[in-house]
Image (tube, helix red, strand yellow):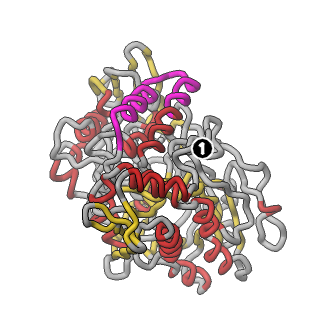
Amino acid sequence: MKNTKKAGVVAGLAALALVVTACSGGGGQDGDGAPKNGELSPTGDINATAAGDVEQGGTLTLPLSQLPSQWNYGQLDGALVDAALIESAILPQPFRIDEEGVPQIDEDLVTSAEATSDDPLVVTYDINPDATWNDGTPITVADFQAWWTALKGTNAEYLVGSTLGPDRMASVEPGTSDKQVVVTYSEPFSDWKSMFAPLYPAKIYNDPTAFNTAYVDAVPISAGPYKIDEIDQTAQTVTMVPDENWWGDAPKLDTVIFRALDGDADIDAYLNGEIDQVYANSSDRYDRVKDADGSELRAAPSARYTHVDFSTKGLLADEAVRQAIQHAVDRDALGKVITGTLPYEVSTLNNHLYLSTDGAYQDNAGETGNYDVEEAGKILDDAGWEMDGDVRAKDGEQLAISITIPSSAPVSQQLAEVIQSQLTAVGIKLDINAVGTDAFFEDNVTPGNYDMTIFVWAGTGYQASGVSIYNQDEQGQNYGRVSSDEISSLLDEAVAEGDPDTAADLYNQADEAIWEIGHSMPIIQQPLVSAQSPKLANYGARAGASDLDWTIVGFTK
């Protein structure tokens, strides 16, 4: 399975965030390295260590599930988890999500950021006087203006993941100097803290061609504690080193190397001592690392969830077929494929917009998303899909569809095979289409070239970032183009609503409609299980969408 981020600028998920708040309290580990009582640490399990106790120097080697090609997070192909992990070390943003799931101002970029008016909404940012791009150009209001220009959706030449937020801004202007930014909104926007994250230089964002291409296989300009030293396509590695132009606290490590490793090759590399950390979120991966020598396990509830996505191309343009599949698939069984031997209680996820650990979570699957083979058959019968041997047909056409997955992804293959068997029981023929890992998103998911597919959404700490997955925005992350006027209207109201309780009610109403239309099927909210070097500090099982502090990631003394 491959992971993509919910983008809310294309990136971002605020009033009530899609962030894990708590599971069963506790966390930590027993002496043998096993998770204590199978509990998940609600605020993360990262071997939190004070900066003074982290060694200066050293090389950290970490895995990637794929080598990103697009390093512009705002671009349509850019919102991948792997890329975002690295971008958080090399690019600035006004707020970072803490271990409690709360946005906190990042004073390395802005010394203050506050709403100075509610009607209309006006937000004023004071840029750190020392903030500078590593080409020597000061970070100013011009960069904020260019970010808005690129992402607000008025120029189709900018291929963006989502316009939500920027499209609600009326103006981005200088305040008392070019180091102060005054943003005035034309409409209320509860998630304003998610904006300008990450920030890119104006010289790139002011030009659509540069926006789309300048950060392909390269990071020409950055501003963070680290910078990209090399992207090696042959070795499939990304190497970052401290940026000598960084004005904040100096990072601890001399070098961080990221290696793209397909399938379970990262587990092999970890067991061979080639990398310092690996995630073991599925039962087969966990079983391989749980007793590894010189290793420890850390675990927390994540902001990631596995899901099955539907498209409206081909036969799945028929809403009845999508609804029938929702009933024919036993999502509890799919969850067990993922978590089989993991020592944690993880339940099936019955909400698209909230995780089970969120206060506003409610089970909205109801009668439209429950496992009911008899109901699935009735829906297909009523829609004119009659049994013809083992496979249903209508107007001479078989009910034959496919599920697209990345090759070298064993869990995706297992899930696809279970779904294949379950759909056979109701007369739907499902072929498994395994494609190259590098082409999975770019050639298949993003352009909507699939009937069904499986991947992982990862929240960013702001609720609104999930909106483009479900509304009718043609430039958004609704790759299957499954939506309705009702869904879009409810989501628009929720994003503009300042009262968290009212917003939660609107989001849940939208979720009920999302189930009814057959948009996608959530499976489970994943626990985040990290196998890592015992000396690795301030890295590992982060809770929810919390951000790393890359300046203190390193090895204990």
Look at 53% across and 61% down and name the residue there: 329
Question: Is 529 in front, or is 99?
Answer: 529
Amino acid of disc 1: Asp
Give coordinates of residue 479: x percent, y percent: 33, 53
Q: Main secondary structure of the magenta part?
A: helix
> Can see residue 88?
no
Question: Is 215 in front, or is 434?
Answer: 434
Q: Left of 127 or right of it: where is 282?
A: right
> Can see residue 551?
yes
Residue placed furthest toward the top: 119
Give coordinates of residue 310: x percent, y percent: 39, 56
Magenta span contains residue 490: yes
Give coordinates of residue 276: x percent, y percent: 59, 74
Give coordinates of residue 494: x percent, y percent: 46, 28
Q: Is residue 404 above or below residue 490?
A: below
Q: Secondary structure at mark 1?
A: loop
Magenta span contains residue 145: no
Q: Which residues are magenta?
A: 483-507
Q: Which residue is mark 1?
A: 98
Look at 31% across and 25% down and name the residue there: 177
Look at 77% across and 65% down and name the residue there: 35
Look at 57% across and 41% down and name the residue there: 364
Q: Left of 542 or right of it: where is 164?
A: left
Question: Is 480 in front, or is 463?
Answer: 480
